[in-house]
Structure formats: C-alpha cells, structure tokens
Amino acid sequence: MGVSPFWAGRRVLVTGHTGFKGAWLCLWLERLGAQVSAVALPPQTQPALYDDLSPWPGQHHTHADICDGAALAAVVARARPQVVIHMAAQALVRRSYAEPVETFATNIMGTVNLLCALRGVEGVEAVVVVTTDKVYANANDGTPFREGDPLGGKDPYSSSKACAELVTASLRDSFFRAGGPAIATARAGNVVGGGDWSDDRLVPDFIRALETDAPVRLRYPAAVRPWQHVIEPLAGYLALAQALVERPERTPEALNFGPDPDAVASVAQVAEALGAAFGLPAPWAQAEGLHPPEAQALVLNSDLATASLGWRPRLSLADTIAWTTEWYSAHRTGADMRALSLAQIARYEEILP
C-alpha cells in the first residue's frame, strides 16, 4: 500500500474536518501535498483537536451544516473536488437517543445533500462515504461481520448509518452508474487516539476522570469492541479513494476497516490498559443507573480490504494504547500537538510496506 504521490496536488473535499477523525485526515492530507477544502460545523468540544492542530496553511475550511443543501452545494462548487471523503455526522450513540431527529437528519439527509450536490460536477473521480462498524444487524454473538451481511442497527445512530449505506447505494445506482465518480462506503468504528474530546467515549471519558483523580465510570464494561488507532482506518479511506480513481471496476463498493483480531477487547480491558499506562491501580468503576441499550459484541472481518487494497492493520492494541497515551500525556504538559501528531503520522508511514 505505502504512501503514494497520488495525493500531491489533488483537490480533496473533506466533510467533518472539525471532528476527531476529520482533523487527523486533513493533517495527513496536508502532509501528502493535497489541496484540501473542507466543510463542517464549528468544533463541538472544548478542547478541540481541530484547534490543537491549527493553523491550517493552504487549506480552505468552511463552517456550514450539511443539512443545508444550498450551502453544501456552494462549497462543492467552490472546491471543484477530484476526491470527496464524507465524514460529517452525528457520531454518538447516546446522543442519538436524546436527539433522534437531528441524528437521522444529519446522517441521512446530509449524505443525500452531498451526493446530490456532486451530480453534474465535472472532474469528481471518487467519493468515499464513511459510515460505521455499527451498520450491521447485530445478534451479539461475536461473529465477525463481513460486507455482505445484512444491515440493521437498533439505536438511532446505528440505524441512521445503515440508512446512509442504503442512500449511497441508491443514489449511486440512480445517478452515477452512467458516468461520474466511483462511490464506495467505508465501515470502521471504535477509533481511539490523541485528540478525541467527545462525550460518552471511553478514552476522553478516561482522560477527564484522570484530571479529577476519579475512576472512569463504565456503562457496559464487558462489551467487546474492535479498537483501533485513528490513523489505521484513515489509511484505509485514503487507499480506497485512490483505488476508486485508479481501478474502479476492481474496487469493492463497501469495505470494512477493522483492527487485528487480537485488538478486540472489552471496554474494561482497555480502561485497565489505560490505567496501567498512567499508573492507576483502579482505573474504572461500574456506572450506576439504567443506560440505553448498546451492542455487547462487535467484531469486523477486514479480509476484503486486505485482498482488494493491500490494507491491513499495522498497530497492535498495545501500540494503540501507547500512541494514545503519548498524545494525551504531551497535551497535559502543553506540548506542540501539531508537531507530535505529524510525528505520529510519519511514524505510521514508516511501517507501511
């Protein structure tokens, strides 16, 4: 797979650039020499990785709601993208219970608005629509999901992302088969790494608890998830986009990007690994009260991404925890987080074939 000159000078539109994954992606695209335009709401957390990685020299960033079709179409027209990577979303499961209308509007109609805005735009070669590992109908038996498995999702977030998969397939078949960009979806989740400050996610919840010398409160400590460092799926998205441009007829229209099977672990196991890294003997406790239901077992099979792209996870769970704790430890001391994040990207590039 490796780092390719493909991105140098290429016009790329990123949606969701003020979020955790989006900020990391924009930084990597900058390093690769791409001409980046981006659109998203303003940062939703404080601190925010987007601010930590500023300034953004040479990139054109716009604050707009992807639910506003006219505003999004204007961004697309200005950007004249060759590649589009769509990550803007309401991405939190618990928030989706509190705000189901907003979640469905953003995750479904935002995707509709983007794809419709791309109709007739000259020069667009590839579109990657990022969904989630939670798009599958989940029986909670721990069987790894493959791309052809039935879609589902019981909570509003998971359901909305499964709907985004259906919307993408429908619009691709309806409007882009006879011409226009190659379009595919990318499924990954439980991404960790430096700079995530969202609510109701394990690592930022742990870091906030660390600041108060309290154990992190876990809703479902036995729940199993496919943990991976944020750089891993981003490498997959970049490889998928490149393949859609260079060999669209041989590139799958949906791909899983999950960690090595050894990186699958329970929430409690990851909390304990974080506690060990920071020297906490009792890093977590059971959260009291009733909590909205969440999937208890979630595992991805990524063989198709390996076969079609040459992508595979490079970081073990221990590596993932080490890189994550390195980032937050540096942040606590006021280090230059842009420089450290670029250094981690460079370190990852060194282990690519």
Image: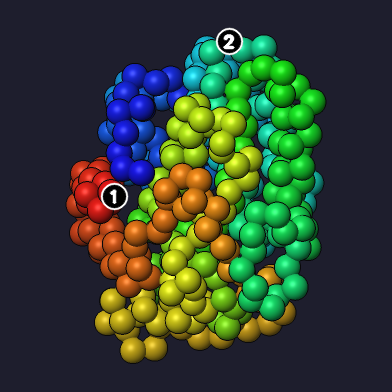
Q: Which mark is residue 188?
A: none
Point 73% across, 68% down: residue: 138
The total of numbered circles placed on residues is 2
Q: Which residue is mark 1?
A: 352
Residue at image coords 28%, 33%: 31
Q: Is residue 199 visible?
A: no
Whether residue 132 appears in this view of the structure is: yes
Relative image position of residue 229 (x, y in whole percent): 40, 59
Residue 347 is left or right of residue 95, and the answer is left
Amino acid beneath label 2: Glu
Q: Which mark is residue 122?
A: 2
Compare residues 41 and 255 and report the one nearer the observer. Answer: 255
Instruction: Indicate whether 271 appears above or below 174.
Output: below
Query: 79 or 32: nearer the eye?
Result: 32
Task: Categorize mark 2 by other alpha carbons within 10 Å: few (<14), some (14-19), many (20+).
Answer: few
SS state under label 1? loop
Q: Residues within 10 Å of mark 1 (few under 14, many from 20)?
A: some
